Image (tube, rainbow, N blue to C red):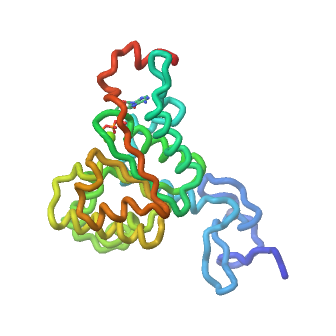
Amino acid sequence: MTTEPKLGMLSDPDAYLPPADGGPDCAYCKNRRFVLDEQGVLKPCPRCGVAQARKVEAMRAFSSHAGVALQQTFFNFKTVFNGQEDEILRDCLEEAERFADNPQGRWLVMWGTRGNGKSHLCAAVANHLRNSGTPALFLTMPDLLASLKHLMDLQANTEQESYSGRMKTIKTAPVLILDDLGAESASSWSDAVLYEIVDHRYRNRLPTMIVTNCPLDQFDPRITSRLQDTDFVTVVENRAPDYRRRPPEEKHSAR
Ligand SMILES: Nc1ncnc2c1ncn2[C@@H]1O[C@H](COP(=O)(O)OP(=O)(O)OP(=O)(O)O)[C@@H](O)[C@H]1O
Ligand SMILES: [Mg+2]
Ligand SMILES: [Zn+2]
């Protein structure tokens, strides 16, 4: 058995090509970024990871991961105020870190009142996954619906731009972080979209983090039930006070 990869080639399979994409030099795919498997199917090169990185970038383009979210990390999430550890926040932080470290086959559902760091932790999970090269899609429910509506209006027909293409991307994203569930103005259409996404990811046990202000029993019972499957879902309630309204000296103290 040979360990040399077969290459997705134009003419000379052994010709050295300088990296055309600014990416790393890869001896395995000889900078073609693709290799052929035994069935003759082109596969992204498993060594240089450039195809994977492009996927991360493509998802970033329509995600809610922008602005302050880019700076929100586990490291700058405070759990100690006035010298006292807030156990609720410590718990939320630990669950988010656990999910980000190994999201495979797991769901994390976090719900609670306003301003206590739920979106911060979504962003921290997204940042952690991005930095470790895992394509993660971070969307708020209102953004998700707005982006689908936009595509519906465009009636675009390329795979990348079509409504069904976008739905597929969301349903099958390697990791989906869905923030502000229940903040959308609900309609039978938005309910159907949400159910289609949640059910697909549920049946395929695709890593998903879901965050909401609403008690879980306020959703469609089909959603509520899936969000609480004790086999693989961790539910955490964030009961910490509104960080936005904490006095500045509490926010800015080192501990
Ligand atoms: N424990 C914390 N440590 C540091 N910053 C925090 C913490 N909790 C919240 N923040 C900051 O407070 C602001 C509000 O937090 P965030 O947006 O995460 O709240 P939320 O729970 O998503 O609120 P909402 O329910 O209104 O969506 C953000 O700027 C966030 O970075
Ligand atoms: Mg939020
Ligand atoms: Zn390669």
Give the farthest residue toward the right.
Answer: 1
Q: Which of 239 and 194 is in front in this view?
A: 239
Residue 5 to residue 255: above or below:
below
Toward which corner of the image does residue 43 lie, by quadrant? bottom right
From the viewer's perspective, is 97 left or right of 159?
right
Q: Position of residue 134 (x, y in %)?
A: 55, 55
Q: On screen, 141 above or below 92?
A: below
Q: Position of residue 153 (x, y in %)?
A: 19, 65
Res 219 quadrant in image:
bottom left
Image quadrant in which you'd find residue 222: bottom left
Q: In this view, does 72 lie above or below 245?
A: below
Q: Ligand 1 is in which quadrant of the figure?
A: top left
Q: In this view, does 97 lie to the left or right of 167?
A: right
The residue at 29%/74% (across/down) is 157
210 sits left or right of 50 in the view = left
Q: Which residue is drawn at 40% across and 13% down?
A: 249
Frontmost residue, 227 versus 165: 227
The residue lying at 42 percent from left, 63 percent from top is: 229
Which residue lies at the image location 39% right of the left edge and 47% below the top edge? 110
Position of residue 235 relative to residue 39, above or below, is: above
Q: Measuring from the top left, give residue 101's x and y in whole percent.
A: 59, 49
Q: How many marks?
A: 0
In the rendered view of the protein, which quadrant contains the N terminus? bottom right
Query: Residue reaching furthest top?
Result: 249
Q: Quick one: 96 or 72, which is closer to the camera?
A: 96
Q: Position of residue 98 (x, y in %)?
A: 56, 47
Q: Nearer the viewer, residue 97 or 142?
A: 97
